[in-house]
């Protein structure tokens, strides 16, 4: 599905923001994870050029936030920017930040849950949760829930489907399904087959340090981002809020600062043409956040009478929408729903089964 005929694999966030500038103007937008050279910074720069009503940047390191905000303000002096220190790994910090955000605005049109980490060593959050999962899923889950009143307020006044929650996932979701039985990697139970990491992936993706497989943990947390988007759509559909999980593509950011040596080596061997710039990397988030053609997608997908036996990917996921600017050789697609077939090739179905089963299980248990 193409949302814009000119979008392709090299489209930048700046170009997307320009295309949807009428949808950005006046909006109250929150982006998490905005440090210099990050995808979050590029996302913020791109939207700032289209006159949002309020741009809130929430991230872990005060000095980095200040640098990014000052830089944006210099280029876009009329934009109102607020910075909030937020440690997603710490639930107390998330609660405080949410309160501050609610003090800054009584409506939030777009929440981009962008911040994330990829860790090679096992670490614990202050709340006793494995740090990757705490940062990448539990923190954003809590923040989103605490911001729901102001998201609902925006949805009440706005066009149906224009209020959006974007979860920045990754193609790394393919590495592991959500580990409901062992999200802390304690190995106390035998993982059921549907929660085990995918087999036959490149060896470096299974790299362990001290017995901890960092990329499996990262992959599981990124699957959680996708499942969270599904759950939000299921629960909030009547409110007019929509959620999308997106894959930004490969960007040489600081994300790899704590990955293991084999993964780092593999990243180093990646051909230069495979990397996107951070501006290109934020394009997908911005399509998901502002493209009006995505507003009614949930209803279209839910309208499929054979929800679990679909004619295409959309139905198969019962409304899971994984949007990505295609990295394919065709380069003609603006938006792909679910991740592009080209990324996963013939193995796509295997992974889909994992997700599908997990979604069905979640529904059954509700
Ligand atoms: N780069 C890629 O190739 C790629 C591919 C797929 C998906 N992604 C996803 O894209 C998103 C952005 O990643 P990136 O590439 O821009 O990485 P990055 O440069 O490392 O940026 C991550 C941002 O998240 C912030 N952050 C980390 N831990 C946090 C915490 N506990 N609380 C609040 N903020 C925290 C970081 O702040 P500090 O700098 O202060 O730590 C930084 O601003 C992530 O969700 C990542 O998983 C990236």
Image: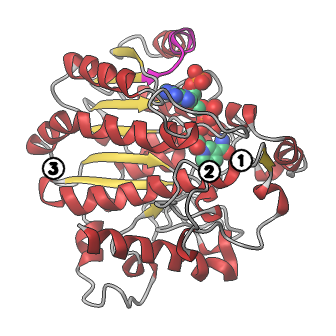
Frontmost residue, 322 versus 288: 322
> Label 1, label 2: how many angstroms apart (C-alpha)?
8 Å
Frontmost residue, 323 versus 9: 323
Which quarter of the figure is the C terminus placed in?
Answer: bottom left
Taking the magenta stretch, the answer to whether it contains residue 225 is no
Q: Are marks 1 and 2 in contact (CB under 8 Å)?
A: yes
For label 3, the residue is 159
Taking the magenta stretch, the answer to whether it contains residue 66 is yes
Residue 45, visible in the rendered structure: no
> Label 3, label 2: how many angstroms apart (C-alpha)?
37 Å
Rendered position, 358 above or below 184 = below
Residue 337, image x, y percentages: 46, 68
Closer to the camera: disc 3 or disc 1? 1
Disc assigned to residue 212? 1
What residue is at 30 percent from the left and 39 percent from the top? Answer: 144
Which quarter of the figure is the N terminus placed in?
Answer: bottom left
Q: Secondary structure at mark 3?
A: loop
Horizontal side of residue 264 vs 76, given as left or right: right
Residue 277, visible in the rendered structure: yes
Magenta stretch prevailing secondary structure: helix
> Label 3, label 1: how many angstroms apart (C-alpha)?
46 Å
For label 2, the residue is 217
Horizontal side of residue 224 vs 174, given as left or right: left
Rendered position, 274 above or below 61 = below
Segment tinted magenta in the rendering = 58-67
Residue density around tag 2, few if under 14, some if 14–19, many if 20 or more, within 10 Å: many
């Amino acid at each position: 599905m193409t949302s814009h005929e000119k979008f392709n694999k090299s489209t930048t966030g700046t170009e997307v923001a320009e295309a949807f500038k009428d949808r950005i103007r006046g909006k109250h937008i929150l982006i998490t994870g905005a440090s210099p050279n990050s995808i979050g910074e590029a996302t913020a720069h791109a939207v700032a050029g289209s006159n949002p009503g309020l741009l809130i940047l929430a991230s872990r390191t005060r000095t980095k936030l200040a640098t990014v905000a000052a830089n944006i303000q210099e280029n876009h002096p009329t934009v109102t920017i607020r910075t909030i220190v937020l440690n997603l790994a710490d639930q107390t910090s998330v609660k405080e930040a949410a309160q501050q955000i609610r003090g800054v605005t009584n409506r939030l049109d777009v929440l981009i849950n962008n911040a994330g980490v990829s860790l090679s060593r096992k670490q614990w959050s202050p709340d006793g949760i494995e740090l990757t999962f705490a940062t990448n899923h539990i923190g954003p889950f809590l923040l989103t829930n605490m911001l729901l009143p102001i998201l609902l307020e925006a949805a009440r006044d706005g066009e149906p489907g224009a209020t959006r929650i974007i979860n920045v996932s990754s193609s790394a979701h393919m590495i592991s399904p959500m580990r409901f039985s062992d999200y802390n990697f304690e190995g106390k139970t035998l993982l059921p087959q549907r929660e085990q990491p995918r087999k036959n992936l490149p060896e470096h993706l299974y790299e362990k340090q001290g017995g901890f497989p960092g990329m499996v943990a990262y992959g599981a947390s990124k699957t959680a981002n996708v499942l969270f988007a599904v759950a939000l759509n299921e629960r909030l559909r009547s409110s007019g809020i929509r959620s999308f999980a997106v894959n930004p593509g490969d960007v040489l950011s600081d994300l790899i600062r704590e990955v293991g040596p084999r993964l780092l080596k593999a990243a180093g061997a990646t051909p230069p043409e495979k990397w996107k710039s951070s501006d290109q990397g934020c394009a997908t988030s911005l399509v998901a956040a502002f493209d009006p053609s995505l507003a009614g997608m949930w209803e279209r997908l839910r309208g499929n009478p054979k929800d679990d036996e679909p004619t295409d990917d959309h139905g198969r996921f019962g409304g899971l929408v994984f949007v990505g600017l295609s990295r394919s050789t065709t380069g003609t697609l603006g938006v792909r729903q679910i991740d592009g077939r080209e990324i996963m090739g013939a193995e796509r179905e295997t992974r889909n089964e994992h997700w599908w089963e997990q979604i069905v299980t979640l529904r059954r248990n509700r």
